[in-house]
Amino acid sequence: MENEKEIENFENNLTSAAVGFLQESAKWSKFMAIIGFIGIGLMVLVSLFMAIGLGATNLPELPFSMSVFSIIYVLFAAIYFFPVYYLYQYATKTSAALHSKNKQLLADGLENLKSHHKFLGIFTLIIISLYGFIFVFAILGGILSTLS
């Protein structure tokens, strides 16, 4: 019974320190999200420069055209958009929730923070897995090259 009362009290009140930490976290998260959006914009601009500007120059022959590299940059920008968007949503919703004392808005903001961390965690696992496959295939390629 006492545990239920503690949970209810926890759900109904945030300490002033917790509110302060959330406000500061929201400010820094908004700053980082804005920097992220600027980075995404720069990635798209660089991809356009690669497709248009470098495609017209006479570079040494590459196995791929510059358009392929341009598309890869746009894909990376698209992937990078989601965690930055989740971080921005966390920052704006949390800040608004703390100013209006709206619990649902705070929950929505924290849900976006969860989505941000989940996206980065899954993406990290994918990259680590790709590195593992590359490592295994590099070893197999080395072994097969010594056999022939």
Image (cartoon, helix red, strand yellow):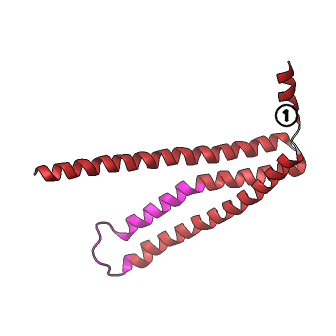
Callout count: 1
| 108 is within the stretch colored magenta | no
Name the chief secondary structure element in magenta: helix
Q: Position of residue 57 (x, y in %)?
A: 36, 81
Picture quarter containing residue 9?
A: top right
Q: Position of residue 109 (x, y in %)?
A: 75, 46
Residue highlighted by disc 1: 10
Looking at the rendering, the stretch of residues picked out in magenta corresponds to 55-81
Would residue 103 be found to the left or right of residue 137 on screen?
A: right
The residue lying furthest to the bottom in this view is 58
Above or below — where is 51 with respect to 97?
Answer: below
Density class for disc 1 (Cα within 10 Å; few <14, some 14-19, many ≥20) is few
Above or below — where is 3 with respect to 118?
Answer: above
Quadrant where the N terminus sits is top right
Would residue 87 be found to the left or right of residue 96 on screen?
A: left
Q: Say which of 42 and 52 sits in front.
A: 42
Picture quarter containing residue 81?
A: bottom right
The residue shown at (75%, 43%) is 108
Q: Position of residue 67 (x, y in %)?
A: 39, 67
Picture quarter containing residue 63?
A: bottom left
| 65 is within the stretch colored magenta | yes
Would residue 59 be found to the left or right of residue 76 on screen?
A: left
Kind of residue sitting beneath label 1: Phe
Above or below — where is 99 with respect to 45?
Answer: above
Q: Say which of 56 and 12 sits in front.
A: 12
Q: Is mark 1 on a helix, strand or loop?
A: helix
